[in-house]
Image: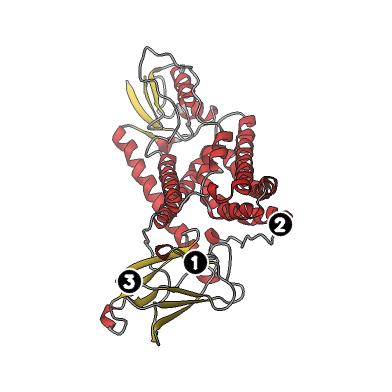
Amino acid sequence: MTTIYIKIVGMTCDSCKNRIQRRLQKIEGVKLATVSLKKMTATVQFDESRLEPSFPIDPIIELGYHTSEQLIFDSEAELNKTKFEKLGDVLFIFLILILIYLGIKRLFGFDVLNAIPEINNSIALPLLFVIGLMTSVHCVGMCGAINISGSVLPFGSKKQRYLRPILYNIGRVVAYTVIGGLAGLIGKVLSPNAQMQGIIIGLASIYMLLLGLSMLGLIPKPSFHFKKKNPDIKLPRKRKSLSPFITGILNGFMPCGPLQAMQIYAISTASFLLGATSLFLFALGTVPLMLLFGLVMNHLKGQKLFKIQKFSAALVILLSITMFSRSLSYLGFNLSSGNGAYAISEMREGYQYVKIDLSSGDYQPIVVEAGTKVVFNVYVSEGTLNGCNNPLLISKYGIERRLVVGDNLIEFTPESEGVIPYTCWMRMIKSQIVVVEDITDTDQLPK
């Protein structure tokens, strides 16, 4: 009797597990076949004289899942080695993605995650659809994992492959529209405070991290299944997770830059109808790319799906780390010192003056002295303002300044030494104000 361990790609639920297990058990010569959804594996005992070790490949692929000779092992120890190999591949892809991102930002000054146009009450309603189209790249980047979770059912009927992405996007559009109407009706009451936004984004980033690890088969897929704890209680045989439509609805309440900008726009309309219409048009603009992303992912299967999973997992994990860093900024923690050399204040009669030149995706860190009023000048050149770097926040002093082209003077008085974070309104661009005891003492200045 021979036992083999098979890694299977594409199982998403108990139904998948049961289909594969029943198919393997029907093969003549197989004595025992058990499939684990948690481990994404099958353990098969068979009579070697009647079957070749590679026999289970075709039946599994015929069902729409993927495996290969390279994914069949003689022991569990060998099977577990593949987890570390996958993690190594993901770390390599992870590094490549970061290098590409930093390279584009460095060479062209373009930050794809911060590419948000300015949205204000002077924009005509039809242009909101165009803005939705423009920001849909940001939507795929920041909500791609949720899109995958809500849209993708790699193995199933063609109807399901088309239906799930459509339902997910309908849910998003409905949620955006309702939020827009409520924002127009009740104004800022709808907007959560910074701490609540930080908690929501933090929880979402943890979910994305778990989803990325589950895509590698390192942990079970996060689910909303109800488990049967009491064997005497009978539950329906077919257990379903939240539908794509509900996932889309929940996605609509996810705090993100473009959506928050649109909520502010909806508030300014002071009308349920106009607020709902504005968010509806914006959401409609995001649909083409988000829908295409879901459909493309849904038509990948077999070896193609196996290869793309590593890339997708690396992207999801990278975005989860980005989101978690952003949530810490909402909660008052700053992990970034900003980019460029520190701008050091100069003492003038009765105050200290410091100036920085605004760039499209960065804030320069500054150094000031404790106990003296600061006049902080943020100089803005033509073409540098966008929907992410404007307005600017210094949360410690309750300052939110909408920047304009030219000089922008911000006044505050630091009382004691320390580091004060300042950020864009979405907490994605982060920098800091270093407060020292004596600005003339070079030993106290940051290196």
- Residue in the image at 40% along x and 56% along y: 325
Residue type at mark 3 is Glu
Where residue 198 sits: x, y (%)?
43, 51
Q: Name the amino acid type tagged 2.
A: Leu
Residue 435: x percent and y percent? 33, 73
Label 2 residue SS: helix
Compared to 203, does 224 lie above or below? above
Check the image and tell me how it is coloured: secondary structure
Image location (x, y in percent) of residue 430: 43, 64
Q: How many marks?
A: 3
Residue 151 placement, left or right of 41: right
Query: Can residue 372 be seen by looking at this rendering?
Result: yes
Q: Nearer the viewer, residue 205 or 38?
A: 205
Among the two numbered marks 2 and 3 on one chain, the one whose residue lies closer to the N terminus: 2
Mark number, residue 421: none
Task: Please give the residue where the numbered disc 1 appears in the rendered image.
Answer: 103
Q: Disc 1 residue type?
A: Gly
* Residue on which the image places disc 3: 415
Task: State the residue position of label 2.
Answer: 127
Quarter of the image for the C terminus: give it: bottom left
Q: Residues within 10 Å of mark 1 (few under 14, many from 20)?
A: few
**First along the sequence among labels 1 and 3:** 1
Q: Which of marks 2 and 3 is in front?
A: 3
Disc nearest the viewer among 1 and 3? 3
Measure how far apart labels 2 and 3 are at the Cα level: 46 Å
Q: In this view, does 365 lie above or below 220?
A: below
Between 441 and 311, the residue placed more toward the observer is: 441
* Residue that appears at 69% across and 49% down: 274
Query: Looking at the image, which residue sits at the far left?
Result: 443
**Quarter of the image where one finds residue 158:** top right
